[in-house]
Image: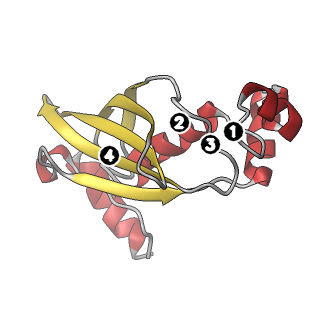
Amino acid sequence: MSSTQCLTAAMLEVGMRHVARLSFTREQVAQYCALTGDHNAIHRDPEAARLRFPEIGDIVVPGGLIQTTVSGLFATQLPGDGSLGLTFVPERLRQPVCPDEEIQVALEITRIRGGIVELDVTVDDRAGRRVTSAKAKVLPPDETYRQWWQQAQHR
């Protein structure tokens, strides 16, 4: 049985939330940088990272890795499998995130119109300080897809 959701627009309501705690390993940072061609030294060399951010003691997790992981929550949790991302507009990262630092991501539905779901996204560190926020629009799966998904869960 999968731990994903598959919620149609008719199953969603304004105010619904999903909260996840995430952290990233140095290996995930290296894999992301290799895949995307991001060769910024702050993602691989703690000394370079400290020159940019004197208060930290390690490399910096790429903002794109955080953003794509957050987008993955749309496709697994809210609304879930079968969702199509339409827009994702993040603001700049307010503070760096280092490997193994836990962040809390909250997705909240703010509007449902014409089958399109609008969400507010917040990302906070362990101390509750805002790391970043974003606005997103997602097209959830339709009922035909949901029926297929339910059958696939039992195979």
Measured as percent of width and height from the top left, residue 60 is found at: 71, 38
Spot occupied by residue 137 in the image (x, y as percentages of width and height): 30, 29
Instruction: Tell me which numbered mark, 1 or 2, is placed earlier along the sequence.
Output: 1
Mark drawn on residue 107: 4
Disc marking residue 55 = 1
Q: Amino acid at mark 4?
A: Leu
Q: SS class of the residue under badge 4?
A: strand
Mark 2 secondary-structure assignment: helix
Q: In this rendering, which labeled residue sits more in front, label 2 or label 3?
A: 3
The one of 45 and 77 positioned closer to us in this rendering:
45
- Residue that numbered label 3 is attached to: 97
Amino acid found under the numbered disc labelled 1? Glu
Of badges 1 and 4, nearer the viewer stands 1
Q: Is residue 41 left or right of residue 82?
A: right
- In three-dimensional space, the C-alpha distance between marks 1 and 3, rounded to whole angstroms, equals 11 Å
Q: Earlier in the sequence, mark 3 or mark 4?
A: 3
Q: Secondary structure at mark 1?
A: loop
